[in-house]
Image (spheres, rainbow, N blue to C red):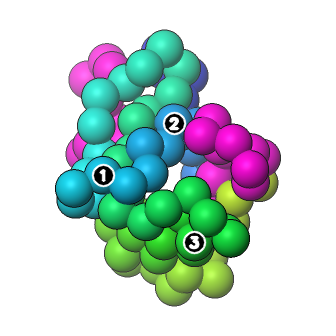
């Protein structure tokens, strides 16, 4: 059982480790209990958090208002909540056992 994500009714909580200033946006490997996500934005003035929420919203096919950084706003380790995702990318399910 993986500990990097958890469902709470219609919301998905995702523990991530952000790598800012990457060459491209991408979902990476599992690092302990966190999923690494690389983003191109710099960690300045909230730009990384804004970019991260837009990127996750795009991946999950939800409006960006449905994605919130719950914990770690000024840290690389974050917990993000996605309300009613219409799709969950396979990359988010790294390290899980098949059903």
Q: Quadrant of residue 90?
A: top left
Q: Is 2 rendered above or below residue 83?
A: above
Q: Is 6 rendered above or below residue 25?
A: above
Left or right, 2 with reference to 71: left
Which dot marks residue 22? 1
Secondary structure under the numbered disc 2 in the rendered image? strand
Q: Is 67 rendered above or below residue 13?
A: below
Does label 2 or label 1 sit earlier along the sequence? 2
Q: Nearer the viewer, mark 3 or mark 2?
A: 3
- Count neighbours of disc 3 (C-alpha within 10 A) and say few if under 14, some if 14 to 19, many if 20 or more: few
| Gap in angstroms between the C-alphas marked 2 and 1 | 13 Å
Check residue 95 for magenta coloring. Answer: yes
Closer to the camera in the image, 59 or 9? 59
Check residue 91 for magenta coloring. Answer: yes
Q: Which residue occupies 53% across, 39% down? A: 16
| Gap in angstroms between the C-alphas marked 3 and 2 | 16 Å
In percent of width and height, residue 78 lies at: 65, 43
Q: Quadrant of residue 67?
A: bottom right
Closer to the camera in the image, 91 or 31? 31
Residue identified by numbered label 2: 17
Left or right, 49 with reference to 99: right
- Count neighbours of disc 2 (C-alpha within 10 A) and say few if under 14, some if 14 to 19, many if 20 or more: many
- Count neighbours of disc 1 (C-alpha within 10 A) and say few if under 14, some if 14 to 19, many if 20 or more: some
Magenta region: which residues?
Answer: 71-99
Q: Is residue 88 visible?
A: no
Residue identified by numbered label 3: 47
Closer to the camera in the image, 43 or 57? 43
In percent of width and height, residue 7 lies at: 62, 44
């Amino acid at each position: 059982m993986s500990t990097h994500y958890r469902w709470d009714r219609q919301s998905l909580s995702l523990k991530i480790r952000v790598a800012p200033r990457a060459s491209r946006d991408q979902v990476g490997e599992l690092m302990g209990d966190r999923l690494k996500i690389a983003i191109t934005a710099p960690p300045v003035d909230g730009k990384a958090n804004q970019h991260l929420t837009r990127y996750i919203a795009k991946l999950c096919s939800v409006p960006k208002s449905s994605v919130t950084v719950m914990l770690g706003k000024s840290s690389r380790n974050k917990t993000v909540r996605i309300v009613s995702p219409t799709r969950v990318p396979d990359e988010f399910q790294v390290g899980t056992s098949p059903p």
